[in-house]
Amino acid sequence: MITIADILNQWQSVGVFNYLLPMLLIFALVFGILTSIQIFGKNKMVSVVISIAIALMSLQWNYFGDFLSQFTPRLAIGLSVMLGLFILVGLFVPDNERRYWGWGLGAIGVAAFIIALTKSFEYLSWGGMSYSEEYVGWVIGGIFFLGLIIAVGASGSGSGGGSGGGGSTTPTYGPWRN
């Protein structure tokens, strides 16, 4: 009997995870960017050729494949933690207080992304720099400080006494809808 592990090991041995999937990801990102900015007008074939060329060139020394093999599992762990937090907030936090929890969960998500990114860079030792825990703390602290500044600025912007445009700033989608 063939198991899923056998199939995944076969795919790994032929290079699906090291070459094919990273190439498809780069192709999709470059093609999406080129078609959205329409630098070549409506001619998508030029965008396809450029996207294929960049995707193939990105695999030349496998930096991108090495990065994805380190970053993706770390990001998946962060996303799993975020999913658990979303479930707990959805179960135990009243609807009228979820907006504030959304800001906090967003900050935790950004912190998880930065930790996954810096740990991947540290493992790969890119740029000859050491990305130690002290730098991660400073970066996360700076992001929280920047978020605090943005939150204070955004909370004061809706306090003007003008007529029109008033109303709730609570999103009307996802678990935060009223």
Image (tube, grey):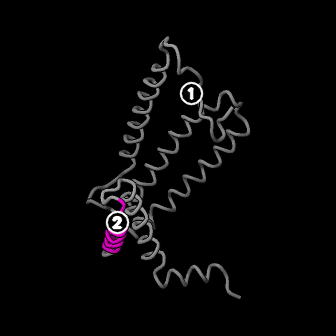
Q: Is residue 155 above or below residue 113?
A: above
Q: Of label 2 and label 1, which has the lower sequence position?
A: 2
Q: Position of residue 72 (x, y in %)?
A: 49, 62
Q: Residue at x 66, y 35 (%)?
A: 177
Describe the element under mark 1 as helix, strand or loop: loop
Q: Residue furthest bottom?
A: 1
Name the residue beneath numbered marker 2.
47
- Looking at numbered disc 1 in the image, what kind of residue is underneath it? Thr
Q: Is residue 49 above or below residue 30?
A: below
Q: Main secondary structure of the magenta part?
A: helix
Looking at the picture, tell me which residue is in the foreground, 130 or 69.
69
Q: Position of residue 40 (x, y in %)?
A: 30, 60
Q: Residue at x 52, y 42 (%)?
A: 108
Name the residue beneath numbered marker 1.
169
* Residues rendered magenta in the picture: 42-58
Q: Position of residue 175 (x, y in %)?
A: 66, 40
Q: Quadrant of residue 34?
A: bottom left
Quadrant of the rendering where the N terminus is positioned: bottom right
